[in-house]
Image (cartoon, rainbow, N blue to C red):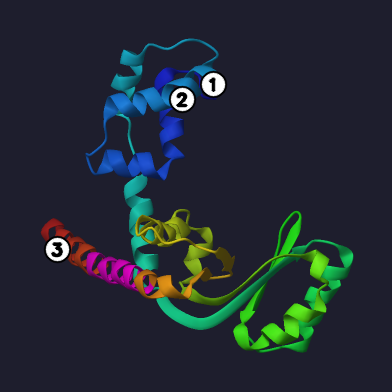
Amino acid sequence: MVNSVSKTLQHLIDNDLSLQDALKRDYANYSAIARILKPKVEETLGRRVKLESLITSVKRAKTNYKSREENITRIIAESVIHLRTDVAKVSVEKIKRNLEMARKVLTNFPGEFLQVLEGVSAITLIFDQKLFNNVYPIFRKQDILDESQNLSAIVVQSPREIIDTPGCAIAFYNPVSRSHINIEETMSCFTDTILVLRMEDVGKAFTVLTDLIAEARKQWVNDRQALLQERKLIK
């Protein structure tokens, strides 16, 4: 049971990878972190907390980020990228008829690049653009919420461990977002992370993701060499 300022703050940091990263890399502003977390700490404890106490707790906070970061780095390093151009998408209202039509599309085009996303109020189909004239007409115009062509899909295939490792997907999204590239749609399918982008953005996105993987591979090799050296010194 979290019942003190330090334990409450530690709990919040343990569940925020960005704060853990800032503390681990020593670029964190302790006062800023304390101010950000102050309302949550007070809400949890049910009382007011002095900012100075929080700043002290932030400075003393421990982070388990290192082991997570190592796992994320390895998963990124072992990932490979596939690119599909000429992709289209259609979003329709989620009603019984359209659900049946979406299933029909899946049945009629086995083996084709085709993804179906089911939300609360809409269904989105992402598919090879060559299928557009077959897919688009099966839905009634009044049911179509949005449609786009000339898109691309970047498919990042990762090791199976990505399923149980938090922080991996955001590691792929962050460099794309920092490059001011809009992600039209995204989905996860087993070990695949799929990003759908405008055709004019795909080259830049492909480059930043390739650089991310290359850097992760370099870091992973360096970490392995450092670990082997450390084991030799211990012996």
* Label pair 1/2, CB-CB below 8 angstroms: yes
Measuring from the top left, give residue 180's x and y in whole percent. 38, 58
Q: Dot 2: few (<14), some (14–19), or many (≥20) neighbours within 10 Å? A: many
Point out which mark residue 8 bears: 2
Q: Quadrant of residue 211?
A: bottom left
If you read the primary sequence from the N terminus, does the residue marked by circle 1 or circle 3 appear first? 1
If you read the primary sequence from the N terminus, does the residue marked by circle 1 or circle 2 appear first? 2
**How far separated are the C-alphas under marks 1 and 2?**
7 Å
**Residue extending farthest right:** 96
**How far separated are the C-alphas under marks 1 and 3?**
45 Å
Q: Dot 3: few (<14), some (14–19), or many (≥20) neighbours within 10 Å? A: few
- Residue 217 magenta: yes
**How far separated are the C-alphas under marks 2 and 3?**
38 Å
Q: Quadrant of residue 104?
A: bottom right
- Find numbered disc 2 in the image and state the secondary structure of the residue it sits on: helix
Task: Name the residue carrying label 1.
Answer: 44
Task: Name the residue carrying label 3.
Answer: 229
Of the residues shown, which amino acid type is indicated by label 2?
A: Thr
Is 212 situated above or below 57? below
Q: Which residues are magenta?
A: 206-219
Measuring from the top left, give residue 145's x and y in whole percent. 72, 62
Is 19 situated above or below 51? below
At x 50%, y 19%, the residue is 3
Of the residues shown, which amino acid type is indicated by label 1?
A: Thr
Of the residues shown, which amino acid type is indicated by label 3?
A: Gln
Is residue 59 visible in the rendered image? The answer is: no
Measuring from the top left, give residue 26's x and y in whole percent. 22, 39
